[in-house]
Structures are given as C-alpha cells and as structure tokens.
C-alpha cells in the first residue's frame, strides 16, 4: 500500500508533462512559418512535428495538415495554394511538399534567386559588409528582369528614379475641394420632386403625374375626385410614393388635371405610425413612439407645404430629440448632471427634464456592492440567551465628565438596552464585568451568548477570561454585516 502511494506523484507528473508536450507540439504546428527557408527545410520541420504528435497518440488530421502547410507557405505561394485548394483530388502531405518544391524551382527559374515580384515594391538601401570577406549576394542574378519605368515606359530605371518625374508630377490633376463637396452632396442628396400641399380635407393622397409614384397601375375603378366647388376630376393611375426617412404614401391617386400634389393628413397618420404637429410658421411630422422629427414643412401664403428637397427632412441634420429616460439608456446610464450639461451645450435635445428623474432600477442594481440582507425574524426564547454589544467612539466633543466613548448592550429577547459611557476603550472589560454581574443578579439567569464584532476591545485576554469564567459563548459577527 505504501509503495502505491509513493508511485502516484510520479505518475501524475508524467501525465502532466505528456499533456503539456502535446499542447506545445500543436502550438508549434500552428505557429511555424516558412520564412526565408526553402520548401524542403520547411517541409521537413512541419512533417517532423506531425510525426511526433502521431507517435504519442494524437495525430493531426490530413485535411488540417494540408490547410496549415498551405497557410504557412506565405504570400509568395498564393497562386500555388489557391490551385491546391481548388483541386478536388485528395492529396497527402508528402505529395504536397514535392509539388511545393517543384513550384519553388519554377519561381526561381523565372525570377532568379530573389523573391517573386509583388504589386508594390519598396526600395531599401543595401547594407554593406564592413567586416572581412566579400559581401554576400543571393545567386548570380541570372534571369532577373531589368527595371522598368511605368511613367516613361523605358527600361533601365524605376519610376522613383525617372529623370522626367518632375514633369509628370506637374501635369498631375489638381484635386479640387469644391469638386469633392459636390461629389459628397451628389452621393447623399436625393432627387427632388414637386412639393406636397398638406390637406386635412382630402381623403387620399393625390398627385398630378405618375412621375411622383412607383409602380403605377391603371385605375380600374369608377371613383372620381370631387371638390368643394362641385367639380369632378377622373383618376388615371394609382401607386405608392416613398419620401425620405421612411415616410410612406400608400394608394396615391394620379389626377392629371390636378394643379398641386395633395398630402392627406388622415391617410398619413393612419397608414404610418406618425403624428403631424402644426405651428407657425412650420409644421412637423414626427414618429409617434420615439417622437423623432422626420420632416419639417413651412407655411407659404396660408398653406402648409412639404418640400421634397433633402433639407426638408431634418431628422439627420438637426439634433435628435428624446426624453431623459431614453437618453439615459442610450448613453450607458450616465448621470442626470451629464445629460443636463450635454443638453445645455447643444449636443442633444431633451424633450422633458424633470426636477427629480425617475429612479433607474438597473443603475441601483449595478451600483449595489452586495445583495440586500434578508430580514431576520428569529428571536431568543428567554432573557439573556443572546446579548448584542457594540462600542462607539471617539466622540468629537468630550462630555462634561470626560467621556469619549459609550457601549450598548441589547437583549435579543426583550429588546431592552443598557447604556454605559466610557472614558477609553481599555475600560470596556471593567464595564463588561459590572454589566454581567448586574444582569445575572437581577434576572437570576446566566448570559449564554455574547455577540460583538471583531474589534480589539472585544478580542483580548481580559474579555476572554471573563466570558470563559462565566460560561458564556462569545460569538463574532460577520464583517460588514448589520
């Protein structure tokens, strides 16, 4: 039995080292890279790691081998890796290394011993060997392509060393800031159409042409548009129209003989979750739930007009408006003072700020250091079964008799409290002896449990000896609990 116990630590150590070795080998397989070494050297290292994993019972899957090997070949073998991955025929690691070596020889014959050309070539200053011996050069340079200039289209130099570089730079097109602004406006502005006149007496949206609607269909009904003066106009088509910021106009009637586009208030508020607020000299279309202003119209000679120009849809151009509770949630439950400051600085707009905002439950839970304590309904069954004690001080103001501290004793059963002033903490043991003698004489009962915190005035030799001699159990309360 003793021999088995002595062998167990060694067994555990061996097992731990085996697991660590497996993880190390797997990390080396994932982190190894070809770098500047040849495919043959890189292939031998990669295959050796895979063979070691297989020898300890954790072989690497063939598909994982192919994937890791192709990934770690680097960008110079991009075309080769792409061709291998696109191939449907199965391939083992040995054949893959042989094909990679053949591809390396092919690249070397095309571009010499240096690396293959890339899209952007960075020129570096050659370093000269200042020590003994001759400077090292990779290969003799056979088959290397001569430099070629993309500017003057001549061989012998690169574009950075072209003698006509200054001439080409002077003829380069100048970037115009006004052109950039125009391009930005063209990308973000929508095509503007005819204005819409807001009409509270119209039952449907009406337009003069099919250009203002999408997917127009010929109106097949017999209904006509009747006006207050008795005139009746026919309906030619029906379709839908989409304004900016999600304002959708459904079942728009095309009345060719109509002179203005009419926007029906009843249709707009019933088909969309929106409200229309009229004021002077503007009116606003806002989201009914979030109170976001989606569009702003104007009062023109007594008529409210909604322009289809991008400036009319002010939701993305003006400050977003929302109540305090919504901004509080959006900004990560920031304080009331922070939102008020941002509102004063004009960075946001608060629709209503109450003098005392509502209490946020997530903020209370997030700022709480611990869960609330449960109410303890347990009570002692008799007097002096449990006595709670606490000492307070020092007082910033000394009493007339020179007391700086006081101690309280609370009976758990009767909730009766005794109060004793103290001149110093060291006199607590004397007061405790007086209290124990007094209550045990008055009630003819022994104090069974004495509960206090872990202060040094309670945990000392004098207090311990007094409680032990009286047969009282000293119970220490948990720190930072009521």
Image (cartoon, rainbow, N blue to C red):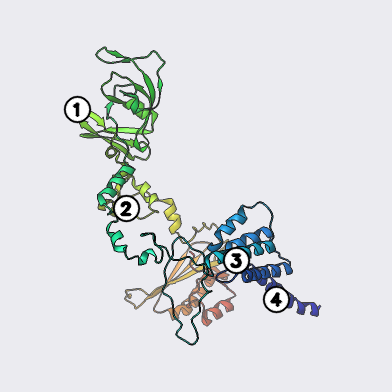
Farthest residue, direction left = 301
SS category of the residue bearing label 3: helix
Q: Check disc 2 and report the residue beneath it.
A: 339
Quadrant of the frame with the N terminus: bottom right
Q: Position of residue 351 (x, y in %)?
A: 30, 44
Whole-Å distance between the Cαs marked 2 and 4? 60 Å
Give the label on residue 134, or none: none
Q: Check disc 3 and report the residue beneath it.
A: 105
Task: Verify CB contact (< 8 Å) between mark 3 and mark 4.
Answer: no
Q: Nearer the viewer, residue 226 or 353?
A: 226
Task: Verify CB contact (< 8 Å) between mark 2 and mark 3.
Answer: no
Give the label on residue 302, or none: 1
Earlier-in-chain disc, 2 versus 3? 3
SS category of the residue bearing label 1: loop
- The residue under the point 52% across, 65% down is 111
Q: Quadrant of residue 217?
A: top left
Whole-Å distance between the Cαs marked 2 and 1? 39 Å
Earlier-in-chain disc, 1 versus 4? 4
Whole-Å distance between the Cαs marked 1 and 4? 92 Å
Give the label on residue 13, or none: 4
Earlier-in-chain disc, 2 versus 1? 1
Q: Nearer the viewer, mark 2 or mark 4?
A: 4
């Amino acid at each position: 039995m003793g021999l088995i116990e002595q062998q167990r630590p060694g067994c555990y150590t061996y097992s731990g080292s085996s697991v660590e070795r497996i993880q190390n080998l797997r990390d080396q397989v994932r982190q190894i890279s070809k770098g500047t070494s040849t495919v043959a050297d890189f292939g031998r290292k990669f295959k050796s790691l895979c063979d070691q994993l297989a020898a300890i019972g954790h072989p690497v899957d063939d598909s994982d081998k192919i994937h890791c090997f192709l990934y770690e070949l680097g960008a110079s073998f991009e075309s080769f890796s792409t061709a291998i991955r696109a191939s449907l025929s199965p391939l083992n690691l040995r054949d893959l290394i042989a094909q990679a070596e053949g591809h390396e020889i092919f690249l070397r014959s095309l571009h010499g011993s240096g690396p293959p050309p890339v899209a952007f070539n960075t020129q570096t200053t050659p370093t000269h060997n200042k020590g003994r011996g001759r400077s090292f050069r990779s290969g003799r340079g056979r088959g290397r392509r001569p430099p070629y200039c993309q500017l003057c289209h001549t061989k012998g130099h690169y574009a950075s060393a072209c003698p006509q570089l200054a001439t080409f730079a002077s003829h380069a097109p100048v970037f115009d800031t006004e052109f950039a602004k125009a391009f930005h406006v063209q990308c973000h502005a929508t095509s503007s159409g005819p204005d819409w006149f807001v009409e509270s007496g119209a039952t449907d949206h009406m337009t003069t042409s099919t250009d203002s609607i999408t997917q127009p269909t010929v109106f097949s009904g017999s209904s006509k548009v009747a006006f207050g003066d008795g005139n009746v106009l026919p309906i030619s088509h029906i379709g839908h129209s989409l304004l900016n910021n999600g304002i959708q106009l459904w079942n728009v009637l095309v009345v060719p003989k109509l002179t203005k586009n009419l926007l029906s208030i009843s249709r707009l508020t019933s088909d969309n979750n929106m409200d229309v607020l009229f004021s002077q000299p503007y009116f606003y279309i806002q989201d009914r739930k979030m109170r976001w202003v989606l569009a702003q119209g104007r009062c023109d000679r007594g008529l409210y007009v909604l322009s289809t120009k991008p400036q009319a849809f002010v939701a993305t151009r003006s400050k977003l408006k929302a109540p305090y509770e919504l901004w509080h949630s959006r900004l990560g439950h920031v304080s009331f003072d922070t939102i008020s400051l941002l509102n004063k600085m004009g960075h946001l707009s608060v629709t209503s700020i109450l003098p005392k905002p509502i209490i946020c439950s997530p903020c209370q839970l997030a700022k709480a250091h611990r869960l609330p304590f449960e109410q303890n309904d347990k009570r002692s069954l008799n007097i002096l079964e449990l006595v709670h004690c606490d000492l307070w001080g020092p007082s910033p103001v000394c009493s007339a008799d020179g007391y700086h501290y006081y101690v309280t004793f609370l009976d758990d059963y009767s909730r009766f409290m005794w109060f004793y002033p103290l001149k110093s903490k060291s006199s607590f043991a004397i007061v405790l002896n007086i209290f124990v003698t007094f209550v045990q004489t008055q009630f003819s009962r022994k104090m069974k449990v004495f509960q206090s915190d872990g202060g040094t005035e309670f945990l000392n030799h004098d207090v311990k000896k007094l409680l032990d001699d009286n047969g009282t159990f000293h119970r220490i309360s948990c720190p930072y609990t009521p």
